[in-house]
Amino acid sequence: MSQFVTFTLGGSLYGVAVTRVQEALRAHTRTRVPLAPVGVAGLVNLRGQVVLTVDLRPRLGLAPLADDAEPMMVVVQVDGEPVSLLVDEIGDVVDVGPDAFEPPPDTLDLELRTLILGAYKLDAGLLLVLDVDAAVAA
């Protein structure tokens, strides 16, 4: 069995392995980084630690979040350092068996497929497993 922390972005359900997730929070005030690449939303102070915040929307080819919407954060470990991922909404932790795992669907955009490790068919829909390292490095 594998466990994934789930979240939604643009109406799709994504997951990250529980072992990579440090915590899930409401969005914090971000400090913009001048000349930062697209997708870098800024830096947040997380209990005295400066943490890079990555907006997954441009990396996944999604339109920006509405100005009045408040994103949430999933803090994950990347190379031993915390990185905050902005998401629309945090979901549940789901358990899935290895027999339900499939490669990324051919219907996904080619650029998006490079950020997806695979998919699980759930009763609630398709769970796309995010490659955190690739999503942060993109």
Image (spheres, rainbow, N blue to C red):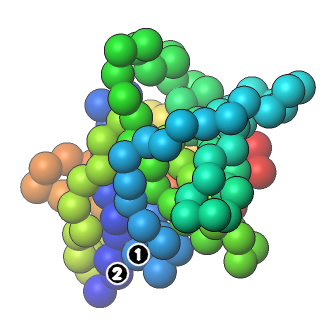
Secondary element at tag 2: strand
**Would you say 90 lies left or right of 40 here?**
left
Q: Is residue 94 above or below residue 67?
A: below
**Would you say 25 lies left or right of 118 here?**
left
* Residue closest to the eye, 37 or 13: 37
Q: How many marks?
A: 2
Residue 45: give its label. none
Q: Residues within 10 Å of mark 1 (few under 14, many from 20)?
A: some
Query: In percent of the image, x 35 and y 22: which residue is there?
Result: 69
Instruction: Please provide percent x and percent y for residue 25.
Output: 38, 54
Query: In percent of the image, x 35 and y 69: which residue is there?
Result: 4
Instruction: Please provide percent x and percent y for residue 109.
Output: 55, 31
**Quarter-wise, where is residue 23 in the image?**
bottom left
Residue most toward the right? 35
* Residue closest to the eye, 98 or 72: 72
Q: Residues within 10 Å of mark 2 (few under 14, many from 20)?
A: few
Secondary element at tag 1: helix
Residue 2: give its label. 2
Mark 2 or mark 1: which is in front?
1
| Residue kind at label 1, given as amino acid type | Val
Let me know if residue 15 appears in the view.
no
Query: In percent of the image, x 66 and y 64: which residue is there?
Result: 49
Q: Report how far apart the C-alphas of labels 2 and 1 lie in the structure.
A: 8 Å
| Residue kind at label 2, given as amino acid type | Ser
**Quarter-wise, where is residue 50 in the image?**
bottom right
Instruction: Please provide percent x and percent y for residue 133.
Output: 68, 61
Residue 18: give its label. 1
